[in-house]
């Protein structure tokens, strides 16, 4: 179990697995350094919105700034791609930086994933 502290609160979640980290070329805004990408398989008792907010708090703590350029440089970018065995990041398969690490975990753990957000 990992306990990650974010100013104002502490959440618990379990790290089940981690993909290989890969270096990928930037998408869109190409005159910037390459990115390092990977995926984590996590179990949590938080609901989707609470866990997504937790990730945004982690990004803020690590000084992630959101600007006009969606494909610009950043200190960190945390996204939920699969939630409760459903793909919730519709275009994850279009880009190497998300598809390769996520597919690695899906295959390694024999996950059965479907499209669309799970029922609330």
Image (cartoon, rainbow, N blue to C red):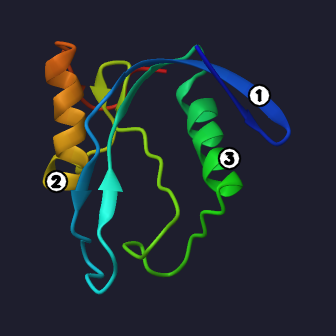
Identify the residue at horizontal 22%, vertical 61% (top origin).
24
The Cα–Cα distance between marks 1 and 3, rounded to whole angstroms, is: 11 Å
Q: Which mark is residue 36?
A: none
- Disc 3 secondary structure class: helix
- Which residue lies at the image location 60% right of the left edge and 53% below the top edge? 59
Circle 2 is placed at which residue position? 96
Mark 2 lies on a secondary structure that is helix
Front-lying residue, 62 or 118: 62
Asked if the residue under mark 1 is in contact with the one under mark 2, i.e. CB atoms within 8 Å, the reply is: no
Query: x, y percentage for residue 66?
Result: 57, 70
N-terminal-most mark, 2 or 1: 1
Q: Which residue is mark 1?
A: 10
CA gap between label 2 and label 3 equals 26 Å
Image coords of residue 120 (percent x, y): 49, 21
**CB contact under 8 Å: marks 1 and 3:** no
Q: Position of residue 49 (x, y in %)?
A: 58, 34
Residue holding disc 3: 57
**Relative side of 43 to 100, left or right:** right
Tell me: 14 left or right of 94: right
Determine the image quadrant of residue 17. Answer: top left
Disc 2: CA contacts within 10 A as few (<14), some (14-19) or many (>=20): some
């Amino acid at each position: 179990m990992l306990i990650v502290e974010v100013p104002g609160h502490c959440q618990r979640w379990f790290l089940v697995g981690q993909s290989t980290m890969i270096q990928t070329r930037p998408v869109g805004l190409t005159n910037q350094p390459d990115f390092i990408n990977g995926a984590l398989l996590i179990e949590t008792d938080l609901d989707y919105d609470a866990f997504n907010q937790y990730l945004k708090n982690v990004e803020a703590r690590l000084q992630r700034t959101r600007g006009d350029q969606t494909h610009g440089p950043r200190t960190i970018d945390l996204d939920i791609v699969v939630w409760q065995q459903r793909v919730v990041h519709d275009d994850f398969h279009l880009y190497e930086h998300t598809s390769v690490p996520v597919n690695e975990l899906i295959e390694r753990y024999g996950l059965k994933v479907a499209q669309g957000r799970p029922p609330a």
